[in-house]
């Protein structure tokens, strides 16, 4: 972005991120944001007087260019795009042509890289994930750099510092969009409205369009449904709740949840 950051690497970026994300919530916002742009102004123009008006103007200029989600906060990817030199911006690999707005797609990724089915992503599993991402984006990365990036990602996103990533950690990394089920209030609806909402819900999770939820489709539905009451659910908890849902819904024991089975479970009269 500017010569002041030309030599910034992943480790230096991590220091900046952790310093300004003081409350460790995954965003730079409010006073943190003002402090960041005040620091930026001193870094970019050390000879110029820093005033509150100039800080706010600088913030507005950069936020309009880099705040992709337009939520008045800086996410880690947005900050990386602002200050990391392009050849060091390992977070570019998380740019997606299509936003990750479906928990089914998220759970496919989770299941693929949770190789030992522990319910967590270890450092080795994260490294495999990053390696595949770099290859997908046709970027050559040395083994030393891959280790550095893996370590940096762990330090940034492993919120409880247990050496593993849980569901919520990976969701932050991939910028998973808001829980799809938050838009529905099925208990407060009429019967017709509940049927209409059920159709939308089933269609959203039935990604394969087979008329039944299976595999990651069940995972995605469980993640969002339980996320309404338990937003910090872990991988092992999801596995248990998945088994419970199948035991209640999977009447014909085929390992899938048919449309009429889910409708009965949710108290919606299925279509004949």
Image: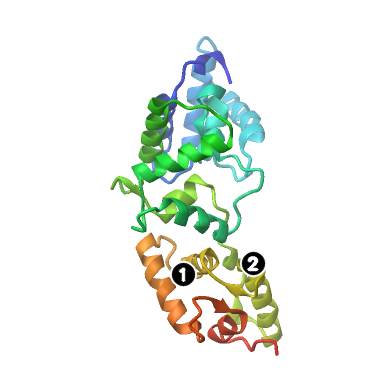
Give coordinates of residue 78: x percent, y percent.
56, 36
* Label at residue 95: none
Q: Which of 224 and 122 is in front in this view?
A: 122
Tag 1, which secondary structure? Answer: helix
The residue that disc 1 covers is 226
Q: Is residue 236 left or right of residue 267?
A: left
Q: Is residue 10 above or below residue 230?
A: above
Q: Which residue is depicted at the point 51% across and 35% down?
A: 33
Q: In this view, does 51 lie above or below 30?
A: above
Tag 2, which secondary structure? Answer: helix
Crowd around label 2: few <14 · some 14–19 · many ≥20 (10 Å): some
Q: Which numbered disc flags the more N-terminal residue, 2 or 1?
A: 2
- Quadrant position of residue 62: top right
Give coordinates of residue 64: x percent, y percent.
66, 34
- Marks 2 and 1, Cα distance to the nearest angstrom? 16 Å
Give coordinates of residue 127: x percent, y percent.
40, 39
- Quadrant position of residue 149: top left
* Label at residue 204: 2
Q: Is residue 184 above or below residue 112?
A: below
Q: Is residue 265 left or right of residue 193?
A: left
Q: Which residue is depicted at the point 50% across and 58% down?
A: 107
- Quadrant position of residue 262: bottom right
Assess whether mark 1 and mark 2 are in contact (beta carbons under 8 angstroms): no
Give coordinates of residue 53: x percent, y percent.
59, 26
Dividing the image into 4 quarters, which one contains the C terminus?
A: bottom right
Residue placed farthest to the top in the image?
Answer: 47
- Of tags 2 and 1, the one toward the viewer is 2
């Amino acid at each position: 972005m500017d010569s002041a950051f030309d030599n910034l690497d992943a480790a230096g970026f991590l220091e900046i991120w952790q310093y300004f994300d003081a409350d460790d919530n995954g965003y730079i916002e409010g006073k943190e944001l003002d402090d960041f742009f005040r620091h930026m102004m001193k870094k970019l123009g050390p000879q110029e007087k820093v005033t509150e008006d100039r800080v706010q103007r600088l913030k507005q200029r950069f936020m309009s260019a880099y705040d992709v989600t337009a939520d008045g906060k800086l996410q880690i990817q947005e900050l990386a795009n602002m200050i990391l030199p392009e050849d060091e911006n390992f977070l570019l690999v998380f740019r997606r042509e299509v936003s990750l707005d479906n928990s089914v797609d998220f759970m496919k990724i989770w299941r693929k890289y949770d190789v030992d089915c522990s319910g967590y992503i270890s450092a080795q599993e994260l490294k495999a994930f990053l390696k595949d991402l770099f290859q997908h984006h046709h970027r050559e990365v040395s083994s030393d750099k891959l280790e550095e990036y893996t370590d940096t990602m762990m330090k940034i996103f492993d919120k409880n510092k247990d050496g593993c990533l849980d569901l919520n950690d990976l969701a932050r990394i991939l910028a998973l969009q808001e829980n799809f089920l938050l838009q529905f209030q099925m208990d407060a609806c009429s019967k017709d409205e509940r049927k209409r909402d059920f159709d939308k819900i089933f269609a959203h999770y039935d990604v394969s369009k087979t008329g039944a939820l299976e595999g990651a489709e069940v995972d995605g539905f469980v993640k969002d449904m339980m996320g309404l009451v338990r937003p910090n659910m872990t991988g092992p908890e999801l596995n248990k709740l998945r088994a419970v849902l199948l035991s209640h819904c999977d009447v014909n024991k085929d390992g899938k949840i048919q449309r009429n089975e889910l409708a009965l479970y949710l108290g919606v009269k299925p279509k004949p």
